[in-house]
Image (cartoon, grey):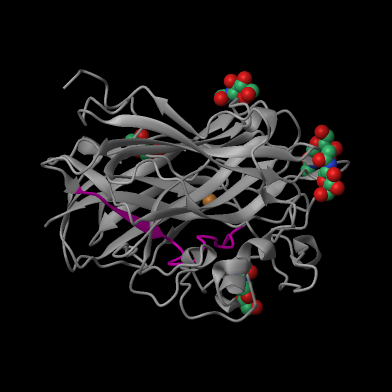
Amino acid sequence: MKSISLVSLAFWSALGSCAAYTGRTEPEPVSHRFNRRQAVSPSSGNDTAPDNDYVMGALPGGQGKSTIDKLLAQHADGADIATLLNPPHAGKVPDPPNAAPRRQPLTPRIEFWHPNSKTVKLRYGPYNVPNMTETGNFGGHGGMLYNYPDLNIDKPCDDCRIVGVNADLEYADGSSANVTNGMWLHHYVHFVVGEGRTDATCGGEEVSLPHKIIGETPRNAERFFSSGNEKTLAAFYGASRIAGYRLREEDQMAVIVDFMNENMEDKVVYLTVTYDYVEGDPEGYADVRPIWFDIVKCGTSELPSPRDSDSFEITSPPWTPDFDAEIIGFGGHLHDGGTSVIVSVDGRSIGVSNASYTEYTVAVPDHDPNRGETGHGHGSNQTTHLSGMSPIIGTDLIERELAKGQKWEIKATYDYGLYEPERGMDGALENIMGIAIMFVIPDT
Ligand SMILES: *[C@@H]1O[C@H](CO)[C@@H](O)[C@H](O)[C@H]1NC(C)=O
Ligand SMILES: *[C@@H]1O[C@H](CO)[C@@H](O)[C@H](O)[C@H]1NC(C)=O
Ligand SMILES: *[C@@H]1O[C@H](CO)[C@@H](O)[C@H](O)[C@H]1NC(C)=O
Ligand SMILES: *[C@@H]1O[C@H](CO)[C@@H](O)[C@H](O)[C@H]1NC(C)=O
Ligand SMILES: *[C@@H]1O[C@H](CO)[C@@H](O)[C@H](O)[C@H]1NC(C)=O
Ligand SMILES: [Cu+2]
């Protein structure tokens, strides 16, 4: 094995400072347009619409539901969700002339652990992200592409094992689309769809709302990965066995993308996903399984913030595995104001994924009365945003075994005294999230 600092290779990309969808009006079938600002009350932690049976928020004192979850719960299936959530000109458009190649082989980067692994960058989309004056999405914010499904996207390989993955955002010519030029990879959720792809934590539920957005069920699609603005790398190394995520020819991939545009012009961007993989199914390789922990079980991860100030903790509904496994690692996801995600088993912490923050030099103010407000209300003109979540891998893990019958949960901690939460121009708090994605090697 080559000597390369494992520590310097950030293991996990959380979803980043992806934020909020506090839409509170019901769909208008004719116009398909929403205006959150007409209906929302500032910093409300309450949502009075009826609960549904399968979105289990864990708010102290109540089961808070985000309006997006209510909409999806009432909606028949995912086929027309894209048109429901975004104005018609948002989303997938043809490649502009002279666009960079959609498939770009790169120098292998995980060879230190996976001999003969290859690295390839795929470009998805492109997607038109409306400018700040366009508020006709479900979130009601200007400048965003809101939870947009893209089905049956290109795969890195047909018969292989994925051993690393990370995501980014680019313009047509391949240049970086990022916060300093007003573009945010707010979040994307990556699914693998196919027989036997049962989502670890939602596979037992009749309905899982993120699966619904891509028109699938949690029994034939699993949430494999996700990323946000921090754009770090999840790589499978450091365990006692060599392992990779098995991709078969019959599997398909789908994504939900959510981008913000802090410009006065529409922007066409590509989601890039860089994969590390080994061809075929080399001898000795074990399977990797992703486990998605969420404070909102089987919803879109959105929870109205329970408080307007100070600090609070939210614990997820418990999950009990029906298999034994070795843990590779995990990483958390929070919104601005968040400080850490703890994963625990039977009440014992196995590690803490801490948030880090960056003061960004932004091209445009998030809130400008003359221009509008950008998606997800990255509030109050503040320039400091959550920019990373520490990976917990290898020796960071206090325990490395997962066993049948255990009680697993995560705890998301927020401290608005330390870091400003996301707010709209009217001061209304945006929804929060608490997620950890853990990768394990199931015993065979
Ligand atoms: C939510 O509404 C209930 C009943 O009206 C009220 O008792 C509670 O304080 C509210 N919670 C928040 C966070 O506003
Ligand atoms: C952001 O994008 C600009 C323009 O494409 C590029 O010059 C800059 O290096 C990028 N910054 C980061 C942190 O990627
Ligand atoms: C900005 O958005 C509005 C509303 O969608 C659209 O009519 C206009 O053409 C856009 N302007 C630019 C320069 O993209
Ligand atoms: C995470 O934050 C806590 C509290 O500040 C600190 O005690 C701990 O050392 C941090 N962990 C890492 C891995 O940085
Ligand atoms: C944000 O900054 C703009 C000017 O850059 C200012 O007009 C506006 O009032 C500020 N908004 C808030 C909420 O501070
Ligand atoms: Cu988020």
Relative to 243, does residue 433 appear above or below in the rendering? below
- Is residue 85 shown left or right of residue 370? left
Q: Quadrant of ligand 4?
A: top left
Q: Position of residue 66 (x, y in %)?
A: 59, 67
Q: In which quarter of the image is residue 75?
A: bottom right
Between 241 and 246, the residue placed more toward the observer is: 246
- Is residue 125 shown left or right of residue 290? right
Residue that appears at 78% across and 63% down: 35
Residue that appears at 13% across and 41% down: 241
Between 11 and 418, the residue placed more toward the observer is: 11
Q: Quadrant of residue 420?
A: top right
Instruction: Name, please, the residue furthest toward the top.
Output: 3
Instruction: Name, please, the residue furthest toward the right.
Output: 370
- Is residue 168 shown left or right of residue 325? right
Placement of the N terminus among the 4 image quadrants: top left
Relative to 228, does residue 139 appear above or below in the rendering? below
Q: Does the magenta stretch include residue 305?
A: yes
Relative to 4, does residue 244 appear above or below in the rendering? below
Q: Give the dominant element type of the magenta stretch: helix, strand or loop.
A: loop
Q: Can residue 204 be seen in this view?
A: yes
Q: Where is residue 301 in the image (x, y as percent from the top left)?
A: 50, 60
Q: In which quarter of the image is residue 392?
A: top left
- Is residue 299 shown left or right of residue 315? right
Q: Position of residue 342 (x, y in %)?
A: 35, 50
Q: Can residue 389 be seen in this view?
A: no
Residue that appears at 57% across and 77% down: 76
Placement of the C terminus among the 4 image quadrants: bottom left
Q: Is residue 290 magenta?
A: yes
Tally the marks.
0
- Stretch in magenta: 287-307
Q: Position of residue 136 (x, y in %)?
A: 77, 58
Residue that appears at 59% across and 73% down: 70
